[in-house]
Image (cartoon, rainbow, N blue to C red):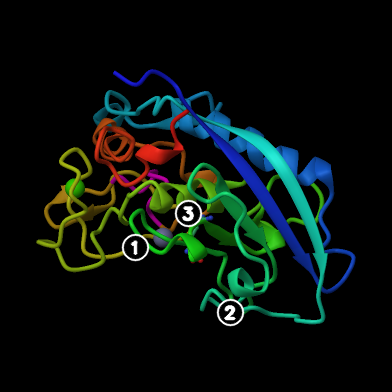
């Protein structure tokens, strides 16, 4: 048992205008959401229907802001091809989660790299409008859940529909099979692949206010990468 795992975080802000140069308060609000969501301390988890509330998990992972870096740039949209990471390399990615906050463009909220990839591109990218809960944020993605979702990927979680039809797996047994993402704020039950979708899972595509849990199986999958031989073992002190 690894106990509570703390992950130090570097936030790399890259801005082309003053809105994108988000405040320290906005950054702090995002760290708070990550800590609440990964420790099941979010005040909306009680909305989980009885079918799923029993597997809503405290992942026992916490986040501490280590450093904030601010960079002015003339680039107004960075896309999803890791360009921002070449321009502003991650700092100590073997021990720190690096988060780039920059305008991605194209309606993309954020993107992440799975464990086991190149250290020079390791981390998560998020557009400033979807980062944190205060300041330059935009509904319905203004509750910091884009980062909860992307850090889920960074810690090895797949989308709950397995990015494919019913038989495609997310390698987690307590997330019911589905055949595609849900959007907006679906009502319960939403049936796909002959079972009720866990639409309120952070690894679906619903609005921020309508996702509020990881499952026990997801917790196990995330924590496995910190065990001896795991892809993020080096992050432990
Ligand atoms: N990578 C996904 C996207 O950009 C993130 C979805 C996050 N969902 C959310 N409700 N914040 O579309
Ligand atoms: Zn995703
Ligand atoms: Ca599953």
Identify the residue shown where x is 32% and y is 49%.
157
Report the label total.
Answer: 3
**Which residue in the structure is indicated by mark 1?**
181
The residue carrying mark 3 has its beta carbon less than 8 Å from ligand 1: yes
**Which residue in the structure is indicated by mark 3?**
150
Q: Is residue 153 left or right of residue 12?
A: left
Figure quadrant of the N terminus: top left
Identify the residue shown where x is 85% and y is 63%.
19
* Picture quadrant where residue 166 is located: bottom left
State yes or no: residue 237 in magenta.
no
Magenta span of residues: 198-204
Identify the residue shown where x is 77% and y is 45%.
26
Foreground pick, 48 / 124:
124
The secondary structure type at the circle numbered 3 is helix
Where's residue 7, x and y in %?
52, 35
Task: Check contact, mark 1 vs mark 3: CB within 8 A.
Answer: no
The secondary structure type at the circle numbered 2 is loop
Q: Is residue 39 among what the camera can see?
A: yes
Q: Which mark is residue 79?
A: 2
Task: Check contact, mark 2 vs mark 1: CB within 8 A.
Answer: no
Work out how far the residue at label 2 is from the one at label 1, CA to CA, in angstroms. 22 Å
Identify the residue shown where x is 15% and y is 48%.
195
The secondary structure type at the circle numbered 1 is loop
- Looking at the image, tell me whether mark 1 or mark 3 is earlier in sequence order: 3
Residue 10 vertical position relative to residue 28 in the rendered view, above or below: below
Work out how far the residue at label 1 is from the one at label 3, CA to CA, in angstroms. 15 Å
Q: Is residue 103 left or right of residue 198?
A: right
Where's residue 196, x and y in %?
22, 46
Foreground pick, 68 / 219:
68
* Picture quadrant where residue 82 is located: bottom right
């Amino acid at each position: 048992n690894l106990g509570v795992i703390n992950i130090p975080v570097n936030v790399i802000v890259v801005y082309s205008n003053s809105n994108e140069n988000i405040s320290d308060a906005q950054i702090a609000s995002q760290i708070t959401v990550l800590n609440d969501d990964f420790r099941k301390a979010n005040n909306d988890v009680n909305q989980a229907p009885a079918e799923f509330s029993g597997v809503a998990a405290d992942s026992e992972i916490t986040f501490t802001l280590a450093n904030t870096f601010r960079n002015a740039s003339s680039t107004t949209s960075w896309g999803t091809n890791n360009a921002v990471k070449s321009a502003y390399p991650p700092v100590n990615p073997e021990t720190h989660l690096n988060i780039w906050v920059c305008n991605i463009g194209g309606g993309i909220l954020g993107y992440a790299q799975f464990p086991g990839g190149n250290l020079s591109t390791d981390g998560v990218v998020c557009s400033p409008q979807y980062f944190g809960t205060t300041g330059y944020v935009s509904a319905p993605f203004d509750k910091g859940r884009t980062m909860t979702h992307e850090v889920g990927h960074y810690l090895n979680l797949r989308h709950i529909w397995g990015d494919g039809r019913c038989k495609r797996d997310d390698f987690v047994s307590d997330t019911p099979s589905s055949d595609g993402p849900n959007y907006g704020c679906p009502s319960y039950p939403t049936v796909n692949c002959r079972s009720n979708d866990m639409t309120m899972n952070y690894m679906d595509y619903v609005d921020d206010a309508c996702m509020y849990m990881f499952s026990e199986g997801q917790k196990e999958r995330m924590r496995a990468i910190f065990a001896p031989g795991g892809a993020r073992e080096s992050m432990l002190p």
